[in-house]
Amino acid sequence: MIAPSRSGQTVLALAFVAGLGVALGARQTPPAAPAAPPAAAAPDLGGFVEIPGGPFTMGAGPATSPGAFDNERWSAASAEGSVDVPAFYIARREVTVAEFAAFAQATGWKAEPRALAARADLPVTLVGWTDAVAYTRWLTASLAASPAAPTRLAQLLREGWRVTLPTEAQWEKAARGTDRRVYPWGNDLRHELATFEAAGPTPAGARACPDCAHGLTDMAGNVWEWTRSPYQPYPYDEADDRAGLDADALWVMRGGGFADPARLIRTTARGAAEPGARRPFIGFRVALVRR
């Protein structure tokens, strides 16, 4: 692993709890997580937040992000680069134990038992990249087939959108916006907005972040989040993320974990692990993208 880190019930139906689809019949139903209220007349997307299309600055060096690692630099001459990311949607919070347990029950997926034994409202951990990808494929099919899916979400799925992991560029743009933020909320460290240097994670979405670029929670700390980008040196090339998703490679994870120092929860910090790695500090969140 390359990571700057130290670290039988029947599924009854699909419902929308705490803003994102979760199957009923999991061991227990987590309490609704706090979330920023949607904009007036905004379409209901079941917990997905729209990230507008357009360019943003990706990567960092000591001048723009004190403490930046070498793998965050685009080149010896330039720490940053511009990436144009089409519009997409990303979940406001991380996938929970209850949600992943519903997937495992519905499909018979061989999950790590300890992952399913944790408190239902915590972000699921001990999940490998292959586990996360399988979950997103199941969720795409489940939402597409569910009459309970919000109207706008159902329409996007009919138009060919799918649930998947965000690319590395999508994740970073969602975390830092277009103003080169060191942390999702700005350039100054704020302990109340992130779970880091801690003994364990906090419930997914429990730390509301209205000052974050898109109101997303836990984009800094709590658990490292898988992306669907293979790990490789910058400059970032979107074409590298479109093929070989099932290959045996190292996959990028972002955001830092609950036990990490502030240096690792910056918006540009990068980690990576082999697809089968199941660690108590790695989880994921999902994105909705056009196929």
Image (spheres, rainbow, N blue to C red):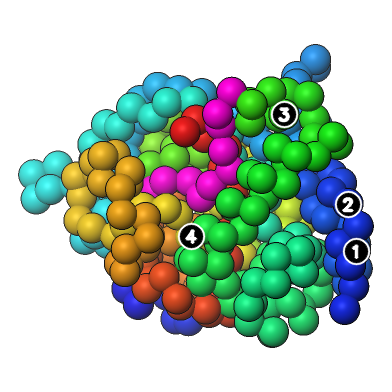
**Looking at the image, can residue 265 be seen?**
no
Give me the residue at 75% from left, 39% from top: 145
At label 4, which amino acid type do we have?
Trp
Circle 3 residues within 10 Å: few <14, some 14–19, many ≥20: some
Quarter holding residue 125: bottom right
Q: As displayed, is residue 109 above or below residue 203?
A: below
Q: Does dot 1 land on a helix, a strand or a loop?
A: loop
Q: Alpha carbon of mark 1 to alpha carbon of mark 2: how far? A: 8 Å
Are the residues flagged by discs 1 and 2 in contact, CB closer than 8 Å? yes
Give me the residue at 87% from left, 78% from top: 8
Quarter holding residue 99: bottom right
11 inside magenta stretch: no
Quickly name the residue at label 2: 13
**Looking at the image, can residue 72 be seen?**
yes
At label 2, which amino acid type do we have?
Ala
Q: Alpha carbon of mark 1 to alpha carbon of mark 4: how far? A: 26 Å
Are the residues flagged by discs 3 and 4 in contact, CB closer than 8 Å? no
99 or 36: nearer the viewer: 99
163 inside magenta stretch: yes
Indicate which disc residue 25 carries. 1
Q: Alpha carbon of mark 3 to alpha carbon of mark 4: how far? A: 25 Å
Are the residues flagged by discs 2 and 4 in contact, CB closer than 8 Å? no
Indicate which disc residue 226 carries. 4
Are the residues flagged by discs 1 and 4 in contact, CB closer than 8 Å? no
Which range is magenta?
Answer: 159-168
Give me the residue at 80% from left, 53% from top: 22
Quickly name the residue at label 3: 154
In this image, 40 relative to 92: left or right?
right
Circle 4 residues within 10 Å: few <14, some 14–19, many ≥20: many
- Image location of residue 164, percent across then percent down: 53, 47
Q: Alpha carbon of mark 1 to alpha carbon of mark 3: how far? A: 23 Å
